[in-house]
Image (spheres, rainbow, N blue to C red):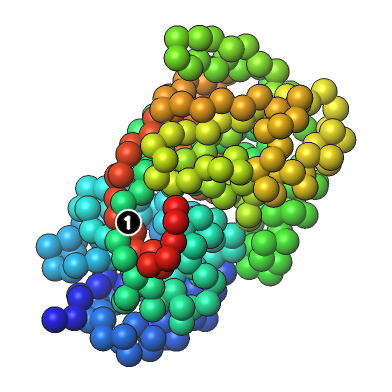
Amino acid sequence: MCSRALLLVNRHARQGQKRLSEAIHYLKKLDLDLVEEPIENSQHLAETILKYKHQVDLVIIGGGDGTLNAAVDALVDTQLPLGILPLGTANDLARTLGIPNSLAEACKIIAQGQQRRIDLGLVNDKYFFNVASMGLSVKITQRLTKEIKRRWGVFAYIATALQVIWEARPFRAIIRVNGESIHVRTVQIAVGNGRYYGGGMAVVHDATIDDQRLDLYSLEIEHWWQIIFLLPAMRQGKHINSRKVRALHGQEFEVETRKPRPINTDGEITVYTPAKFQVIPQAIAVLVPSSTKL
């Protein structure tokens, strides 16, 4: 018996509208029974998943990390398995899970792959897949328009980051972990659940999305130009070896700032400090390549 799948594609994702008919063709050819719902606004994803929770066997979402983040609460509520079509700009969750950008291959993984349970991060009342962060990444998110991402793809992250870096101003924060309070002066605090974020940057070189831990780094530089020397290492998650970077691991963190600061979760600004970060082990099931080691 073929699986009945709810197909939700963000038509405003970088490749959403363009690749929708192609995705439908591949999925039907792989004997998936599709329930197609057009999504013009990612805010409607959660209510659509809840609407069909008793009528389908899995949910297939086409879009980027922001689209997936908009659906995550409903996926937790319904416990429907998730299939991913990487049609966004960065596709960091797909990269973490070993899902290729090839649409044909991604469809095969949904039809023939295996279910794996993954962890989620939770900051205050918001779930996230990849990273929750404050500081530089928030400024980058505020500058990155949909038009820029659609036109330049992953290069938009690099160009925008370079614009933001020279304006970087440190802020003070208190990080609480395992009963200890750590006072920092930093330009960025990032808390990772998965490995990749920001168009292929790695939180930590050995992070996995099912290791039941969070990885925090605090970028504690004095001058903006010092970031430039860290950028190559950040692609591999090796920046944590620098004296300018504080690295911590745990299942729970709290971060306090003098005034509320916005927090970016999977590329969307969703909550503010003070913030409590937690890992939620094996929170949902995703379809991944059978050879993937998370």
Q: Which of 6 and 121 is in front in this view?
A: 121
**Kind of residue at badge 1:** Arg
Residue 15 image point, x, y percent: 54, 74
Q: Quadrant of residue 293?
A: bottom left
Residue at position x 33%, y 37% in the image? 280
Please say if 61 is above or below 125: below
Classify mark 1: helix, strand or loop: strand
Q: Nearer the viewer, residue 45 or 186?
A: 186
- Quadrant showing the N terminus: bottom left
Answer left or right for 258 relative to 140. left
Residue at position x 72%, y 61% in the image? 155
Answer left or right for 32 relative to 270. left
Residue at position x 55%, y 17% in the image? 175
Residue at position x 48%, y 17% in the image? 177
Q: In which quarter of the image is residue 135?
A: top right
Q: Can residue 155 be seen in this view?
A: yes
Residue 127 image point, x, y percent: 38, 41
Q: Which of 128 and 10 is in front in this view?
A: 128
Q: Nearer the viewer, residue 5 or 101?
A: 101
Q: Is residue 13 visible?
A: no
Residue where numbered disc 1 is placed = 116
Q: How crowded is mark 1: few (under 14 residues within 10 Å), some or many (20 or more)?
A: many
Residue 119 image point, x, y percent: 37, 43
Please say if 259 is above or below 84: above
Q: In which quarter of the image is residue 166?
A: top right
